[in-house]
Image (tube, grey):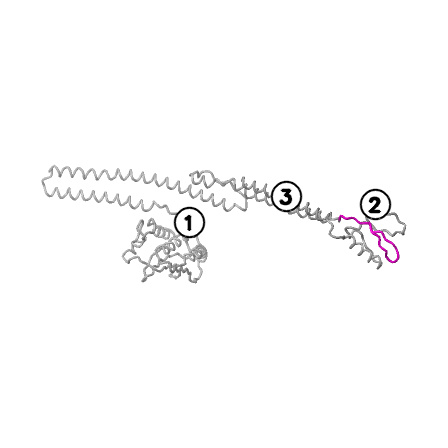
Amino acid sequence: MKSYLKFTITVIILLALVFLGANIILRASYNEINGRPYRVEAERIAAKIEKGEDYSLSEYSYITNIEAVDEGFKYGNSDYLVKEIDGRLYRFDYTYLADKSYELRMFNICFGIVAVFALALLSFVYFKIIRPFKKFSDYPVELAKGNLTAPLKDSKNKYFGKFLWGLDLLREKLESRKASELALQKQNKTMILSLSHDINTPLGVIELYAKALEKGLYKDEQKKLVIAQSINAKCEEIRGYVNDIVKTSSENFLNLEVNNNEFYLSSLMDNIKAFYTDKLELLKINFTIDRFPDCILSGDFDRSTEVLQNIIENAVKYGDGKEICICFSREDDCQLVHIRNTGCTLSDNELPHIFDSFWRGSNVGSNSGSGLGLYICRSLMHKMNGDIYAEINGSDMSVTVVFAVS
């Protein structure tokens, strides 16, 4: 804000200096006499008088008056020269100063219009862009601090309307995610407490049987067999509880949401092309998208874009950096999108595990990652009634995304 105010003051000062300087220079140049321009004007008027043509002194800058005189006329106080035209004497009064007030006035008017336009533009930028931006410039900082409760005020500003809408949408998403995380934490704690209570019961039974066996209370071998079977049953019961914990944790820790709708395959591909064409060109990777018949897909457009981006990022990370190709095929009511990259170093026995959570292959090298990318892709595609699978063809890796066709 302060820097813009300084900039505005600087512009106003420069305009004032240009205005004053131009006026001084123009006035000085108007007052200068280069040679004797009044003689030139007198010769032109004399020629017109001699030819009997009409003339107007307003068209001339130096000649102020013309008068026919006799030989005995009085000189007077003004500057003049005398010319004989057709046997008569004419007195030409002149001035050394050219009358350029009209030109000077027109310059000042034009410069004034430009100055007013410049100041109006600066004011427009301030009131329509700078000041509105100042009002919500601290909003991203508040979001980063976790202040998600205060929504942005509605604004009809056409320059920031979409930006404000996007910020408020981000706030709502963060607020929703925060609420979901709190609910998930509460659910997990409740589940842990419940399972802890449930596990304590079979553990107590096992502990009693173990102490009885340790003290030799059971002499009958048949009775010992029954106790061993009971201990085994309780262990299976505990294993069931543990499996429930693992299943619940794996289903809830990402909290993936989709908004299934309909969208065109061409829109999805345009999005991917716009995002990756320049990026892969800089990396010198040959990126091609085969021709395809357009169709309407069922699913979440943004999530579908996320899935394809995740696969392409993996192709960039783990391929040889030579080629990435997107091709298409159709099976029944499904549209298949194949993303193929060269330079696959993943072994065949590792292929079935690439969609598991937290799994990373032997080809990761120094590439960082969490092992969740393809797991998220599979989870999203299942929620969109689609699927995803991978194949290794020689040295090429191909990941196929299956979309439901509307």
Q: Nearer the viewer, mark 2 or mark 3?
A: 2
Q: Which residue is nearer to you in this view: 344 or 3? A: 3
Q: CA distance from mark 2 to mark 3?
A: 40 Å
Q: CA distance from mark 2 to mark 1?
A: 97 Å
Q: Position of residue 193 (x, y in %)?
A: 29, 37
Q: Disc 3 designates what residue?
A: 17
Q: Quadrant of residue 232?
A: top left
Q: Is residue 34 left or right of residue 223?
A: right
Count neighbours of disc 3 (C-alpha within 10 A) and say few if under 14, some if 14 to 19, many if 20 or more: few
Q: Nearer the viewer, mark 2 or mark 1?
A: 2
Percent coordinates x, y for residue 237 in the rendering? 23, 43
Q: Secondary structure at mark 3?
A: helix
Q: Amino acid at mark 2?
A: Asn
- Crowd around label 2: few <14 · some 14–19 · many ≥20 (10 Å): few
Tag shown at residue 210: none
* Residue that badge 2 annotates: 77
At mark 1, the secondary structure is loop
x and y, in percent, of residue 257 in the image: 39, 47
Could you tell me residue 305's position as x and y percent? 41, 53
Q: Can the viewer see residue 360?
A: yes
Is there CB contact under 8 Å for labels 2 and 3? Answer: no
Q: Earlier in the sequence, mark 1 or mark 3?
A: 3
Image point 13% across, 38% down: which residue? 214
Residues marked 1 and 3 touching at CB (< 8 Å):
no
Instruction: Confirm or deny contact between disc 2 and disc 1 (CB under 8 A).
Output: no
Judging from the image, what secondary structure is the residue with disc 2 in? loop
